[in-house]
Image (cartoon, coloured by chain):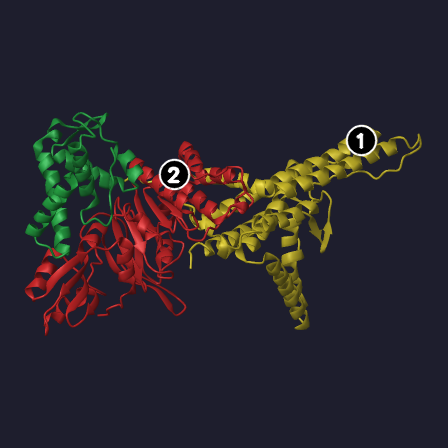
Chain colours: A yellow, B green, C red
Amino acid sequence: MSTSAPHRPPALVTIALEQVSVVGLYIRSTGLLLVTIYLIVLAATISQFSRFQSVGSGRPSMTNFTFVPESSIIVMILALIVPLKVWQDEEPAKRSYHWVMPLPRHAHTLLKVFAGWTWTMLATLLFVLGTALLPIIAERMTGLPQRYHINFSAWEWLVPFTAATITYLFSSTAAVGGRRPFIWLFIAVGIYYFVLLLLLKLGLPGVAQDFRSVWAGRYGASAAMSGADITNGQMQFGPYTELRRWLGVTVLWGALSSGLLYFVAVRHRAPR
Amino acid sequence: MLIAVEPTDPRPIYVQIVDEVRRCMVMRTISPGDPLPSVRQLAGDLRINPNTVSQAYQELERLGLVEVRRGQGTFLTNVSASHAQRREVARNVGTRALRDAHRHGLDVEELIRAIRAAHNTHSK
Amino acid sequence: MTGPLPTLLSQVPLAISTDGLTKTYGDATVLRDLALQVPLGSVYLLVGPNGAGKSTTMKILLDLVRPDSGTAEVLGYSSRDQGSLVRANVGYVPEQLDWGYTWLKVGRLLEHHSRYFPSWDDAYAKHLFKSFDLRLNQTVATLSKGQGRRVHLAMSLAHRPPVLILDEPTDGLDPVMRDEMFRVLTDHLSDTPTTVLFSTHHVGEVERLADHIGVLADGQLRAQLPLHDLRNQMRRYRASIPPGWQGGHLFRERVMRRITTHNEIDWTVWGEEESVARELAGAGASVRDISLFTLEETTLLLLTRPEIVR
């Protein structure tokens, strides 16, 4: 007796799109809530502009709205949280439903990460557009020139996106790799400070400084994840980033976070 | 055409189907030229493996009792109404009766006498 | 060899086969050197008590569990090395219903599932849902056990895979639904050439559908053969014996159950009916009755008899 022709696994693109759709559905309610809050804040801010208009003919005092592409701490926090939400219901050991699907597990995991990333990028885009529009609207409504006229190079608009991506990748690694990602976060922070203190106690301030710069230095992880410029150990939000520094930080930590994520995804490839 | 099969019958299911079709022929519930239910229909109705039904239909075709017309289905042939089928059905019934008799410790003569007696009582 | 019944099939093309499959959980050996053989196009019933290793075997075939040793193959694909190819060709109904997305509507879940199987037949899926009395706008989390199983079954049939692996597909279904399920399955087999490997506790209901059987107990197959052969060769013989009868040794391990009194024997023997009857008669026993077993009785017999170890 013959059987029908052998079936093939699905195209990865099809699954990527499907995961985007399904993950979107999953975070929809939270996402809508956040978008609503954001729009309310924007609207509230804009409504304040009219106040300045009607203050009087004298010099109105109003802080200049400066939009800096790099100042997206909010986006960084979002990028940190999204993976935790996406993988919330799925512990690595318990994802039996997905394992039944005709895909290699690690491919499936990575496609899901990709899906969450697209939504994170969408959120980042919304945020950037919204806050970029604020100075424009402010100027229109108040007649006061805003400092957004400062020249931004085109590439600086990419900074929030790369920062969010790197943050997202690290957070996904934690979410995919362990059962309780928050615990991993705490452990990582704990180890960092522990090593720092240890080095200082051992009388190695130079080594301690080098170690600290991995996180807080000019090319450190925090710079990559927040998009802010780190000078003399101080985080500065301003259009001071250099293309070279940004490229270096992004490539370095981008590669590291991707590699870590891939490693963690592949580690769960085979069943017990 | 009502076909019944019994899993505990010593005959394989496909043989039972063949015998049942014969029975229906002899009983004239179906006539030469009539279509048999499709394999799908019969398998679904009886909840049996379609392969088994196919096997039965192939056997019926081999015996010359049915013919398969491409795209139309399976139909009874003219052979089906012959005496040979009647004899075959009788043989099956007889075999079953003999088997039952043996299980009750009766020999063939006792069985024949008992059948005759029962028939006489019945026709009175 | 663990008994007189055959455990290996003669040369036929196989859809599913395992070789030396062994799996241990802690100190419990669930599978012991298993050689499962499911012929291409067959409907293979796997029976055995709970915990016998049926579910584990099915999971190993789909690469959801790795064996400790041995190999498993489905349609020629290695379960270990080509797991996703295997799963692309199999419709699977698991024993434990595990939903990835409990918050989805059933209709959306169906759509989700359909993306993973390019051969998905959407009209057929909708038709199956109707047959199984399922609603598309119900949330997955609110499905009862029986409904969940029906959803799984519908999804496994909808992409018309060459192989179906069904782990207790009728569990939790009432008799009416079970009957409907078998009707659906029979129709499906008529339309789509399929190899079916399934397990169930309702053995009597599947007697007509199954054509092969494997009896799994203690991690090994007590018997693996075409159902027709099992039916033909298991008989219960009641015979009267003369005083001082010397035939007690006859057939040896082929006697599955043996009750011998001073003037009667009630033996369940594995073998060709005519030759067994002849041998008994030849030994001086007078055979009074030869009776058959239902499949249910046969499997019970095979499972409860003490295992004969080499």
1 and 2 marks in contact (CB < 8 Å)? no
Name the one closer to the observer, C47 or A242.
C47
Question: What SS does tag 1 mark?
Answer: helix
Residue C252 percent location from the top left of the image:
15, 68
Quadrant in which residue A60 is drawn: top right
Quarter that holds the N terminus of chain C: bottom left
Name the one closer to the observer, B122 or C297.
B122
| Image mark 2: chain | C
- The numbered mark at residue A139 is 1
**Image depth: mark 1 or mark 2 in front:** 2
* Amino acid at the residue labelled 1: Glu
Name the one closer to the observer, C32 or C147.
C147
**Residue C54 relative to residue A128: left or right:** left
- The numbered mark at residue A60 is none
Provide the residue designation for mark 2: C159
Question: What SS does tag 2 mark?
Answer: loop
Residue C258 percent location from the top left of the image:
20, 67
Looking at the image, which residue is at 59% across and 57% down?
A: A181
